[in-house]
């Protein structure tokens, strides 16, 4: 029996419009193999629409997509439109109103794709950043005074709630318990009881390779209200998972370790700002922003979740047909997983891995000469071959 998934499609601007068709081609191919049909409703919400009509999306935009199974977005952003317009006029309303409180960003170093970091070896670097997506440092609370005067000042409040931090941390802990890392046979092999690491132990014994390991990004030495609160909740919640190893790192030291020893990480839980920065850094460690996928999840499934590659609209290369579609295609795999099709999702990820491992076809950002279409065709040809 064929299941039909209704997808709200927002290609957006620039290369968003070029990588979305690539992802759809892969979805349709893998869908045919697994009895999944996709019905797409396309929306022109974008900076182009903003320039023409004065708004990124119509006033009733959220109502139009609330009943879809998922939202798939390319990228939004255009020269001449301030970035806060595209962010606060489209992405943030969707993330917040649909309670997509987890931003999930997997990082993996693929065979055949050289990382700029010497120590980042294929098969060893495989972790996920779990970023808080609806509260924290990105708040609208604050203001500016005395504009243009010597005593001018700006204040911006961060908002951390017990409910918000708890649900985010719980998601990360559950993920760490069930996640299968590259090269691991079964999730069950990773649950050897190791006990919780106390913060004082970090750095030393917390070497990895075993998975089932959570790192909390903090900065409770400098940020003295919200971050100690974050730390307390992390400690409370991890105590409920005695089989998991965990530690916490200040964001500055964590950033350095992400470059020096990326293979040590498994699941990183982080606030909105820290997770945003870490995941771009991690994407660079994995070989470039063009390959990085992301999911904005409403784990409670009260609303649709939104899937979008990490990269933006890349106006510098838009229109030339050379955008790397891996980020969008991998993002489509995450959507398949979320919609309950893990075998189809794995097939897509394996197809990307197979094309990269063959070291033949790649787009210019990865040092090759392939177009978006040529690369996508190679992925389509590889679907189901391993
Ligand atoms: P960007 O990700 O669009 O581009 C950064 C650099 O990476 C550029 O040199 C670009 O050519 C390259 N690049 C990105 N994706 C690529 C791909 N798939 N293949 C090959 N090369 C790729 O970030 P930037 O330049 O900071 O922002 C451009 C616009 O995109 C801005 O308007 C920004 O607001 C928007 N943006 C939107 C996001 C979204 O829709 N979620 C996320 C990030 C930025
Ligand atoms: Mg970012």
Image: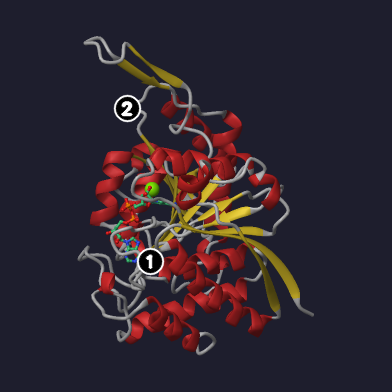
The answer to whether the beta carbon of the residue marked 1 is less than 8 Å from any atom of ligand 1 is yes
- Ligand 1 visible in quadrant: bottom left
Query: Quarter-wise, where is residue 359 in the image?
Result: bottom left
**Does dot 1 land on a helix, a strand or a loop?**
helix
Residue found at x 45% / y 26%: 158
Closest to the observer: 341 or 231?
341
Mark 2, residue position: 221
Is residue 91 at least partly visible in the picture? yes
Mark 1, residue position: 291
In screen coordinates, is 371 left or right of 148? Answer: right
In which quadrant is the N terminus drawn? bottom right
Residue found at x 21% / y 11%: 150
Residue found at x 51% / y 29%: 160
Query: In the image, is residue 381 above or below residue 286?
Result: below
Query: In the image, is residue 10 above or below residue 159?
Result: below
Q: Where is residue 78 in the image (x, y as percent from the top left)?
A: 38, 51
Q: Which of marks 1 and 2 is in front?
A: 1
The Cα–Cα distance between marks 1 and 2, rounded to whole angstroms, is 34 Å
Crowding near the residue tagged with mark 2, few <14, some 14–19, many ≥20 C-alpha atoms within 10 Å: few
Is residue 181 at least partly visible in the picture? no
Q: Where is residue 358 in the image (x, y as percent from the top left)?
A: 34, 87
Query: Quarter-wise, where is residue 175 in the image?
Result: bottom right
Q: Position of residue 85 (x, y in %)?
A: 44, 39
In screen coordinates, is 265 left or right of 384? Answer: left
Residue found at x 65% / y 71%: 341
Farthest residue to the right: give it. 1
Earlier sequence position, callout 1 versus callout 2: 2
Q: Where is residue 296 in the image (x, y as percent from the top left)?
A: 54, 51
Closest to the observer: 383 or 263?
383
């Amino acid at each position: 029996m064929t299941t039909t998934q209704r997808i709200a499609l927002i290609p957006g601007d620039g290369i968003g419009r070029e990588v979305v068709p690539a992802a759809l081609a892969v979805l349709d191919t893998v869908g045919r193999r697994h009895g999944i049909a996709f019905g797409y409703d396309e929306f022109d919400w974008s900076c182009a629409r903003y320039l023409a009509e004065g708004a990124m999306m119509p006033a009733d935009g959220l109502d139009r997509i609330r009943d879809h199974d998922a939202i798939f977005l390319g990228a939004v952003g255009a020269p001449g439109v301030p970035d806060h317009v595209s962010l606060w006029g489209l992405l943030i309303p969707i993330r917040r109103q649909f309670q997509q409180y987890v931003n999930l960003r997997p990082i993996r170093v693929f065979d055949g794709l050289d990382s700029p970091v010497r120590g980042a070896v294929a098969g060893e670097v495989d972790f996920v950043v779990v970023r808080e997506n609806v509260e924290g440092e990105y708040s609208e609370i604050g203001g500016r005074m005395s504009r243009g005067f010597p005593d001018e000042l700006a204040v911006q409040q961060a908002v951390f709630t017990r409910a918000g931090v708890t649900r985010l941390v719980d998601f990360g802990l559950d993920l760490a318990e069930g996640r299968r890392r590259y090269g691991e046979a079964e999730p069950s092999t990773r649950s050897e009881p190791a006990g919780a690491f106390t913060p004082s132990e970090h750095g030393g014994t917390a070497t990895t390779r075993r998975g089932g390991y959570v790192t909390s990004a903090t900065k409770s030495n400098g940020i003295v209200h919200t971050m100690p609160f974050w730390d307390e909740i992390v400690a409370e919640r991890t105590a409920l998972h005695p089989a998991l190893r965990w530690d916490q790192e200040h964001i500055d030291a964590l950033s350095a370790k992400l470059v020096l020893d990326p293979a040590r990480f498994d699941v990183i839980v982080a606030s909105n700002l820290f997770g945003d920065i870490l995941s771009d850094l991690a994407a660079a460690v994995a070989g470039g922003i063009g390959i990085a996928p992301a999911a904005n999840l409403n784990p409670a499934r009260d609303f649709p979740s939104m899937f979008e590659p990490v990269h933006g609209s890349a106006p510098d290369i838009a229109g030339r047909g050379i955008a790397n579609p891996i980020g969008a295609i991998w993002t489509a795999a995450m959507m398949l997983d979320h919609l309950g099709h893990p075998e189809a999702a794995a097939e897509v990820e394996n197809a990307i891995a197979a094309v990269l491992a063959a070291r033949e076809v790649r787009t210019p950002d990865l040092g090759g000469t392939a177009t978006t279409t040529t690369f996508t065709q190679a992925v389509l040809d590889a679907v189901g071959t391993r």
